[in-house]
Amino acid sequence: MIIVMKPQAERQNVENVVKLVEDNGLKVHLSQGAEVTIIGVIGDKTVLMDKNIELMKDVDKIIPVTESYKLASLKFHPEPTRVKVGKYEIGPDTLTVMAGPCAVENEDQLLEVAREVKKDGAQILRGGAFKPRTSPYAFQGLGEEGLKYLKEAQEETGLATITEVTNEQALAMAVKYVDMVQIGARNMQNFQLLKEVGKSGVPVMLKRGLSATIDEWLNAAEYILSEGNPNVVLCERGIRTFETATRNTLDLSAVCVIKAKSHLPVIVDPSHATGVWSYVAPLTRAAVACGADGIMVEVHNCPEKALSDGPQSLKFDSFASLMKDLEGYKKLAGRA
Amino acid sequence: MIIVMKPQAERQNVENVVKLVEDNGLKVHLSQGAEVTIIGVIGDKTVLMDKNIELMKDVDKIIPVTESYKLASLKFHPEPTRVKVGKYEIGPDTLTVMAGPCAVENEDQLLEVAREVKKDGAQILRGGAFKPRTSPYAFQGLGEEGLKYLKEAQEETGLATITEVTNEQALAMAVKYVDMVQIGARNMQNFQLLKEVGKSGVPVMLKRGLSATIDEWLNAAEYILSEGNPNVVLCERGIRTFETATRNTLDLSAVCVIKAKSHLPVIVDPSHATGVWSYVAPLTRAAVACGADGIMVEVHNCPEKALSDGPQSLKFDSFASLMKDLEGYKKLAGRA
Amino acid sequence: MIIVMKPQAERQNVENVVKLVEDNGLKVHLSQGAEVTIIGVIGDKTVLMDKNIELMKDVDKIIPVTESYKLASLKFHPEPTRVKVGKYEIGPDTLTVMAGPCAVENEDQLLEVAREVKKDGAQILRGGAFKPRTSPYAFQGLGEEGLKYLKEAQEETGLATITEVTNEQALAMAVKYVDMVQIGARNMQNFQLLKEVGKSGVPVMLKRGLSATIDEWLNAAEYILSEGNPNVVLCERGIRTFETATRNTLDLSAVCVIKAKSHLPVIVDPSHATGVWSYVAPLTRAAVACGADGIMVEVHNCPEKALSDGPQSLKFDSFASLMKDLEGYKKLAGRA
Amino acid sequence: MIIVMKPQAERQNVENVVKLVEDNGLKVHLSQGAEVTIIGVIGDKTVLMDKNIELMKDVDKIIPVTESYKLASLKFHPEPTRVKVGKYEIGPDTLTVMAGPCAVENEDQLLEVAREVKKDGAQILRGGAFKPRTSPYAFQGLGEEGLKYLKEAQEETGLATITEVTNEQALAMAVKYVDMVQIGARNMQNFQLLKEVGKSGVPVMLKRGLSATIDEWLNAAEYILSEGNPNVVLCERGIRTFETATRNTLDLSAVCVIKAKSHLPVIVDPSHATGVWSYVAPLTRAAVACGADGIMVEVHNCPEKALSDGPQSLKFDSFASLMKDLEGYKKLAGRA
């Protein structure tokens, strides 16, 4: 941490800052520049959190030098993390395909989709039982009934399963039926929920918030990790920008940044990012090409009749063809 | 709702769309243009929600003509709403000042601040008992103990009180102690929480999400209203943009847009929007000048020692001087 | 400037960086932290520009401590700048009102508007002769003919005049007819044009780019100032964000930031920012309330027939009423 | 174009709108809905441009149904465009690699880089002679001298060449030396320059503006096309968002959108988008995987000594290795 003093800061005010830092058991390095004085702080800066040094007289600004997350950082955990989900492993050697409908609508629909995506080579079946919807008048999900169908599909097909949880009750219910839970974009900073997932130990996929920086996203992961749950997978699903041609803007460079800063696996979801089914296949290929550890795509037996997000869902034939396409890209990426 | 067909759409495909609309009890108006055919849909479009007309053959796009919220809309409720909070009223004739520390830290701190803001003319005391923080290592709030201090401050000073609730347990606890609850920016689309607040009937201030459009914000209000709670106040607190000179970008034009689209009162919070105490006073004046029904500002007895958001808090003398400044602006705005 | 080394940087690599800095005539302060080594650089850092220290071995990142602009900075010019435009002065004691049509359309229109805005109390007449338009099929301006009408209006009414210049030819032509030129948002980083305006010495209003940070904006001003032209006025006109309810998002906090960082006057243009005439009056009041040195608003004798940006133009009666409203706000702001 | 009237619009006001439309030679289709009346306009809507129908009484809003560009649209030109640059062709069957230093610094540097990228398989040599720089104190380019070195490199290696032009003088000079010119992000809406490039007929690569929507980008292309120059190639180079981990956010979904809306080729530049050399290779692979017609990457003989944008430049070995990697991706994409 670096404390930058204002030009012409008074000597006494510089000394006050130095004293505060030293009184908290840290060391300082003072640089008297031509224009400004800079105070470098050495030691565990968390003890200075909530000290509001910015408000001390003649302090211009505080510049953090190291990240605020530790457990999620590659610096302190240089080996890539592998997360077991059912019998599958998400990590550097595999390309995990999560596929299924946006929402679980009924038993037949889910089983039909499950059989198809299994046949085409997916490992994990997705399906929402609790749906956060912008309008209160839209379909909100089947709840526990949906979870039961997921369990049934898992038992019949051998696929692992994932579902979104939107609060603690949903979490408590979901862990009884599925192999992995998802924290959605809107809940990325629902810190109470993050802590509960952390305590549960269940494998979790943490989606990036619509307007979350990568730094905030890794801090959100830190909430889960710091409660003792190492089974965290990140998921890039588009950020909010000024562009309206796609629902959100898929930020594939985030995959590269995560790989440079963290050991956690990262998945890409082009279906929610774009909102347009015909953009899903090319962007899925791109995700694999730039290093994603897996992809999540929406597949529906009949998108025209889907109760949620039909326009972004692939039909069976498009999904099968995408899976065939991916073979070449997996080989180039050195993944099985 | 308008359905735009692709250029050279086949006649049969146009007819299929028309049939679907009519089968759902709605009427259509067909416009055969030089380039494209347009199908206007007349009647209650909610019956077409989840029909995924975008996916029908030769359909180019769907253009909504009316908003998806009804109860929050000025069109269906042309009179401005007035919300009673304790003995005060938030609405078109008043300028409500909510002030207090970001977090309740201890009894002495809260009471000292409460006495000061009361003396200077505030109506509502703010103070966080449940703090959502980006890093898991930062101060997270006193919980129920904090609520008790708020109750105590209310009883001593006569101020009404407001506190943020971050989940259903916090809500259930908070309503026993405070006059108004706040849904924070990070929870603006925590739909389960919105519904619970809707059922509770408690006066609520709904902060705009960091990356929420005004349309989504009003849809979030609709969640509360549609459960039967009319006591909703909106709060603009800055949106996320590329600019980093301020923490977020305060969107004062949102006040104008809300006034044009909704009957709900709207409050402005320049403290969280900017993150810099010296920008709070000028932007508070601006908020009043453009029509806000109230303001929320952070005030602390000793910002240097605040456990949360000290840099954006006003000291007592700055707050007192701001309140004096506001007198002239209130008069110009025709508010008491 | 601070150079942060990677954790476990090799001693030799740290020494290489130190050597490079010292070889360029600068001094270093070395801080050996628990995790990282930090190298503070003291002296005129511009000599290190283009040295690409980021690429030296074991360097993690470079953190700038001071701004890259000097002439525009309040630190080196603590007195507010006053810019003379014709017989008027833009600065801390006045509230300058620039008003007029988006585009000069014909002689009658311009003169009619000029007489009206003069009567209502404006100081500067705006009118575009060179119009940058998104679509090549839209009206592009009258060119020199428009400039002649501006000159005529100036002579008849005594108003000063301002017009946008979009390239060097337009600039050379405009300075013969008007008192002040404007660099539009789209040209904020047209550096060749900035330099030419710098050489010309003509009073200039520099609009903020749609996606320009305040720092980039001040660097653009620096281009003009560094060519010897001190007559620079800034103009906030909205930035591009995800919100679509207004054309752009007016960033009034930018006024506060500019006042904290620079000595240059700042004007606010709510007409272009919102694109909606009914939001112009409240946001104009807000601009004055938060410290703007002036405002620019579009006024048209007949917005329904305007060839450009009619929907955001005020009619005569709305403008007259806004000017009356502003009286109270000017008094509160201590401006004449 | 659809005109939406306000709820309870007066009959006379609806008729006035209808009359205006019909008086301009267009036909209307009237839809009387339960809540609102909608007026569909049939015919060439450009005659209504600048009519400001939004301002007529009881008009709520105007909704465009078709795009404002024609020549750039896939609807009116369903075959993909092929652009010849020197002896190479940019289009659907090839993968064009543009490589070279950000700025031409001297003869040796440019020739050394040219020989290397030629050897590795690039087709086009890039190098800036006119550099737009945020700070006036940074290196601004060699001007005509740089163009001469480009010509020399072209003659020696057989590579085609591209350079950025920042104004009309630069354009006039550049066409004498290079095979293709580039309009940079900052000049995407420098309409005068677009028109001049349109008149020149020279092959041009039009970079997307930092905050330009895809629609605005295609309108900018329309400026060039409408002057009779069909040789337009688009280039995605990142947009400005709130994320700061990369310099800009590379929007690869823009490639998919362009392919769905336009016949123009599209190139991706990951060097400028990210600003970090280590992210360039994975994002280049991703660009090819999602359908880009080519890529532009910065390569420097000695990035540590580059006068501009060193941190994002690849060294020779990284570039050679990327080119080898791309072989597999080109094959999968069906490009030579």
Image: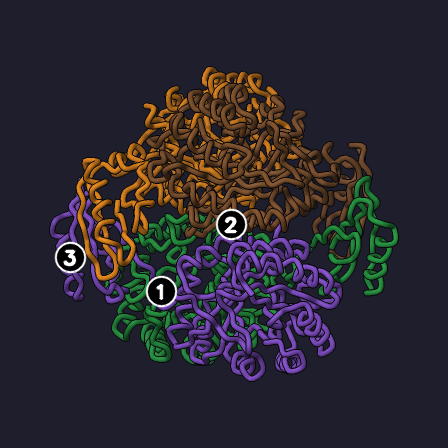
Chain colours: A green, B purple, C brown, D orange
Near-viewer residue (B11 or C10): B11
Residue, far front: C119
Q: Chain of mark 3?
A: B
**Disc 3 residue type (three-letter):** Val
Compared to B209, does A142 lie above or below?
A: below
**Secondary structure state at the residue bearing disc 1:** loop
Task: Using the rendered image of the protein, determine whether residue C313 is visible from the camera's viewpoint.
Answer: no
Q: CA distance from mark 3 to mark 1?
A: 25 Å
Near-viewer residue (C75 or D133): C75
Q: CA distance from mark 3 to mark 2?
A: 45 Å
- Residue drawn at point x = 53 percent, y = 38 percent: C121
Near-viewer residue (D202 or D156): D202
**Secondary structure state at the residue bearing disc 3:** helix
Residue designated by label 1: B69
Residue designated by label 3: B18
Compared to D294, does A72 lie above or below?
A: below
